[in-house]
Image (tube, rainbow, N blue to C red):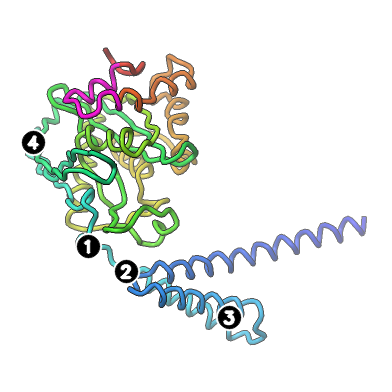
Amino acid sequence: MGSLRRLLSGSVRWLIAAIVFLCLAVPLLWATLAIYYSNLPWIELRIGLAAAFAAFAIWALWFSRQRRMSFVAAGLFLGVVVWWLAIPPSNHRNWRPEVAVMPRAVIDGDRVRLTGVRNFDYRSRNDFTVRYEEREILLSHLVALDFYISYFAEGPVAHTFVSFIFDNAPPLSISIETRPEVGEGFAPIASLFKQFELIYVVGDERDIVRVRTNYRGEPSYLYRLNTSAEDARRLLLVYLARINELADHPEFYHLLTNSCTINIIRYANAAGRVGRLDIRHILNGLIDGYLYLSGRIDTALPFGELRRRSLINETARAADGAADFSDRIRAPLPTMPH
């Protein structure tokens, strides 16, 4: 019995020590990365300051015998937090052309006029003719909502976006994305540290969808959501309000709190969705399984069969730049009305 008590006592001490270590190490790691990804213009300076902070904090917290050094490290950490919080987002940078124009919406009763609608003509993923358009839609003609999942590589993380379906006009895609500058590309860790502003790309499916299926080679799946026309209209109005907010007040993209799927769920909640947070909202490459189990997409087929038949890359490549691209990618899908 005594040996059991000693074993349990030792295990508890190790557990407490591990918790204390994590409580110190996680903020230290965060602050080090925050310095490295800060708004200082020279990478050498950022690397030097991040390394110096990490080295001092490790010494102060685990090796120094002077208790006041721990308070100095805590003070430096708070200073990094205040500095990081003060870094402002901007709508004025040297943006890549794909995200150079912020869309806007003018709502006049049933009529909505959109500017900055992207409709690029692609020859390859990096060779395209820049074309932004104006588009007018009628809310009363919005009849359905479609959901896309596009994979950089098949796995638990993907990009999701929606298309609003009208009975008198082509679908309107809205994709919540990072807004990289010229020479930048998406980096998951960097996106946690104010490295990218947020943009809602509004565009034609021959751009938003085709660039992913035909030129980036991303496996892409398309599902019709079991959403009423009224709910789809409410959701679109939430999107339009956010589009106008971002045009006037920029925000930073954040992979875990201000990104594609998280915001889609957030806006669906604002438009009337009832449901709880699910890990698949973050591991969004699994989101179609969640939608299936919750009855938000058609369940007439087994999920594996539905998913296999919802892959649109082959039909998208065949349709390419055709005027009826949107109709052709939906024609063979089991969840679309024909």
Considering only order in the chain, which callout, 3 or 1, is on the residue closer to the N terminus? 3
User: Does 118 sit above or below residue 142?
Assistant: below
Question: Which label sits on residue 310?
Answer: none
Q: Is residue 295 left or right of residue 24?
A: left
Helix, strand or loop for disc 2: loop
Judged by depth in the image, the label closer to the viewer, 4 or 2, is 2
- 264 above or below 251? above
Circle nearer the viewer, 2 or 1: 1
- Mark 3 residue type: Ser
* Disc 1, SS: loop
Closer to the N terminus: mark 2 or mark 1? 2
Count every numbered label the image shows and give the total. 4
Which of discs 3 and 4 lies nearer the camera? The answer is 3
Residue position marked by numbered label 1 in the rendering: 93
Q: Which residue does the numbered mark 3 point to in the structure image?
A: 70
148, 241: nearer the viewer: 148
* Magenta span of residues: 317-331
Residue drawn at x 19%, y 45% is 241
Upstream in sequence: badge 4 or badge 2: 2
Residue 109: mark in rendering: 4
Find disc 2 in the rendering and name its residue: 87
Dots 3, 4 in contact, CB < 8 A: no
Whether the magenta-drawn stretch holds residue 328 is answered as yes
* Residue in the picture at 34% in, 70% down: 39
Could you tell me how far apart the alpha carbons at marks 1 and 3 are, in whole angstroms?
39 Å
Contact check, label 4 and label 2, Cβ < 8 Å: no
Which secondary structure, mark 3?
helix
Q: Nearer the viewer, mark 3 or mark 2?
A: 2
Residue 197 counted in the magenta span: no
